Image (cartoon, rainbow, N blue to C red):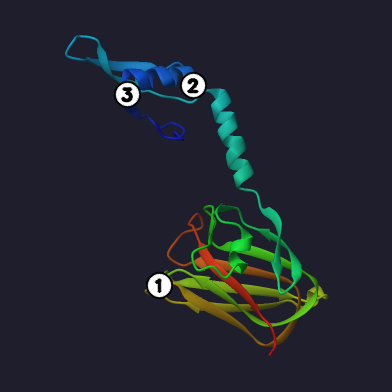
Amino acid sequence: MPDQIADGEDLTFVVLKDEFTKLQASGDYQPIRVEKIIPCPDGSPCFRFIKLAFSPQKEESMQAKILAESQPVTTTAQWNGQILNVIHAPLSDGTITNLFDTKAETFIRSRNVNPLWLDFTFPATTPLTGVVVRVGSEPIQVVVTVNGDNPSTKKVFIQDAGPSGDLKDVAVDFGGTQDVKTLQIDVKNKLSDQNGMVHVWQLDFLKPK
C-alpha cells in the first residue's frame, strides 16, 4: 500500500486475503469499502478490489510528521578546529558533518527544498577568501551571503556552473579577504522547481594564503 493517499484521490487497490486482514487490523484506515471480489478456483475469496481512506487519527499523525520534517534544523559542525553553529534546510539524506569529512561517497540531500540553504555562524570573525561547493552534474547556482560583525557589511557573491558529466566543484571567489562572522550558502538546482532536491557532497571555506 502507498504511504500517502492524496486528498480526494479515488484509487482502487487489489489485495489478497492476508493483505486485506492486515489493512483492517492496522487501524490506519476508515472502514474499507470492498468494490468487487474475484474468487479463487476453489470458490473462496481470492482478490478483493477495495477503496481506501485514511482514518482521522492517521491523517493527523501524517500531517504532524510532515510539519516536523519541514522545519529548519539547528546543529553544529567542526571546521579548522572551530565549532560552527549551523541552521539549515531540512534534509532527506545525510548530515552536515558529511560536508566536511572529505569522503567522496558521503553527501547531503534536501527534503524537497530548492535552493538548499545553509547558515553558518563562526565563534569569532574569520578571514575567508571564498568557498568551494561540490555538487552533481546538473546546472547549479551558488549564492554566498557574507556578514562580518557589522550587519551593514553584508556582501553577496554568485557563481553559476553548467551541466557536467560527473561531480564538480563550484568555487565562489570573494575577490579578496572577507572577515566573516556569519555565512549563508544557497545551492540551487537550476533544472528543478522549488520543491526539487539538491545534493551537495563537500564544502570548504577558503582561508587566505
Q: Is residue 51 left or right of residue 180?
A: left
Q: Give the Cα distance between marks 2 and 3.
A: 15 Å
Q: Amino acid at mark 1?
A: Asp
Taking the image as shown, residue 120 lies to the left or right of residue 112, namely right
The residue shown at (47%, 75%) is 168
Specify the quadrant that holds the C terminus.
Answer: bottom right
The residue to which callout 2 is attached is 26
- The amino acid at mark 3 is Val
Q: Is residue 143 above or below residue 17?
A: below
Give the residue drawn at x 40%, y 74%.
Answer: 163
Q: Nearer the viewer, residue 61 or 128?
A: 128
- Neighbour class for label 3 at 10 Å: few (<14), some, many (≥20)? some
How far across and down, in percent of the image, does residue 134 sit? 52, 72
Question: Is 154 above or below relative to 8?
Answer: below
- Name the residue type under label 2: Ser
Cα–Cα span, label 3 and label 1: 43 Å
Q: Secondary structure at mark 2?
A: helix
Residue named by callout 1 = 166
Q: Earlier in the sequence, mark 2 or mark 3?
A: 3
Quarter of the figure with residue 110:
bottom right
Real-space Cα separation, disc 1 to disc 2, in angstroms? 45 Å
Q: Does 29 sit left or right of 204 as displayed?
A: left
Which residue has dot 3 on it?
Answer: 15
Q: What residue lies at 41% left-to-right and 34% top-to-bottom?
A: 2
Q: Residues within 10 Å of mark 2 (few under 14, many from 20)?
A: few
